[in-house]
Image (tube, rainbow, N blue to C red):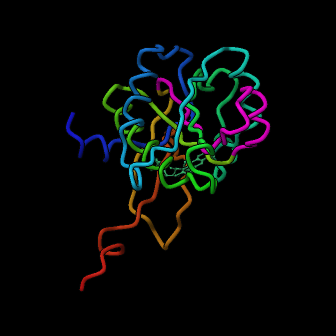
């Protein structure tokens, strides 16, 4: 698969098959996040695999899913069985600003996941302090984002945005439709 196809095919998936992703595959994704672009090459992030059954179960209530959908959160038998936690190391960067770098890392991991036939959901609506406690993280590590990783049990596609409505929705076939702004709208011609 070429990179352009991975970029165009990648969609957020929130319902997963109950089939575990191997640790080897999760580590491959982290290896991709590790080498992403970092401002001044500081590399202030750490990563953790979360795939212990009990921890995954306790983690779910500390996350939020599909704010625009009434029935968009995964049911118990559709939830991800693994996550990658993206952590900001405050001993490397003290000001606590990790979102930009974490975004580059998450994006890099998501694109490799497409190539590997895996589905992902980038999670930012998190109860961060509770998650930090649950994972038993060192005080110096901040939870920035989680990336849910699994095998897809849902279809999602891009559609043209109508009337500026950014809300994704589920169509009559159960497919998630994600409106994207057109090239004409986003391109500023100078
Ligand atoms: C910073 C960030 C935080 C996000 N947090 C959540 C989240 O907490 N829960 C969720 O269901 N989706 C979350 N998403 C996924 C977005 O809803 C999704 O990317 C968007 O609707 C576009 O869909 P697409 O990824 O399929 O293009 C997040 C995405 C980003 C970039």
Residue for point 68% across, 22% down: 56
Res 9 quadrant in image: top left
Mark count: 0
Quadrant, the C terminus: bottom left
User: Hey, which residue is sitting farthest bottom in the picture?
Assistant: 190
Q: Is residue 72 above or below residue 165?
A: above
- 143 inside magenta stretch: yes
Point 49% across, 55% down: residue: 100
42 relative to 34, above or below: below
Q: Which quarter of the figure is the N terminus placed in?
A: top left
Where is residue 97? Give x, y as percent.
Answer: 59, 56
Q: Position of residue 40 (x, y in %)?
A: 39, 55
Left/right of residue 82 with respect to residue 179 in the rendered view: right
Quarter of image, res 24: top left
Question: Closest to the observer: 118 or 136?
Answer: 136
Q: x%, y% of residue 105? A: 44, 43
Q: Is residue 42 magenta?
A: no
Residue 160 percent across, percent down from the top left: 38, 62
Question: Residue placed at 73% from the left, 36% from the top?
Answer: 139
Q: Which residues are magenta?
A: 126-151
Q: Residue furthest front?
A: 91
**Residue lying at the far left of the rendered structure:** 2
Taking the spot 49% from the left edge, 72% from the top edge, the residue there is 164
In this rendering, the answer to whether 76 lies above or below 157 is above
**Looking at this view, is 65 or 39 the one in front?**
39
């Amino acid at each position: 698969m070429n990179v352009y196809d991975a970029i165009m095919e990648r969609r957020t998936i929130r319902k997963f098959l109950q089939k575990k992703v191997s640790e080897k595959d999760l580590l491959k994704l982290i290896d991709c996040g590790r080498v992403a672009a970092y401002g001044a090459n500081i590399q202030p992030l750490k990563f953790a695999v979360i795939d212990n059954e009990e921890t995954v179960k306790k983690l779910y209530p500390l996350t939020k899913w599909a704010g625009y959908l009434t029935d968009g959160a995964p049911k118990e038998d559709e939830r991800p069985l693994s996550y990658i936690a993206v952590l900001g190391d405050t001993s490397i960067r003290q000001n606590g600003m990790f979102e930009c770098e974490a975004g580059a890392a998450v994006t890099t991991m998501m694109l490799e996941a497409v190539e590997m036939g895996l589905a992902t959901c980038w999670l930012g609506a998190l109860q961060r302090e509770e998650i930090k406690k649950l994972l038993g993280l060192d005080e110096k590590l901040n939870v920035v984002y989680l990336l849910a990783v699994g095998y897809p049990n849902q279809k999602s596609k891009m559609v043209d945005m109508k009337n500026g409505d950014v809300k994704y929705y589920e169509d009559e076939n159960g497919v998630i439709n994600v409106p994207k702004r057109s090239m004409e709208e986003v391109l500023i011609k100078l």
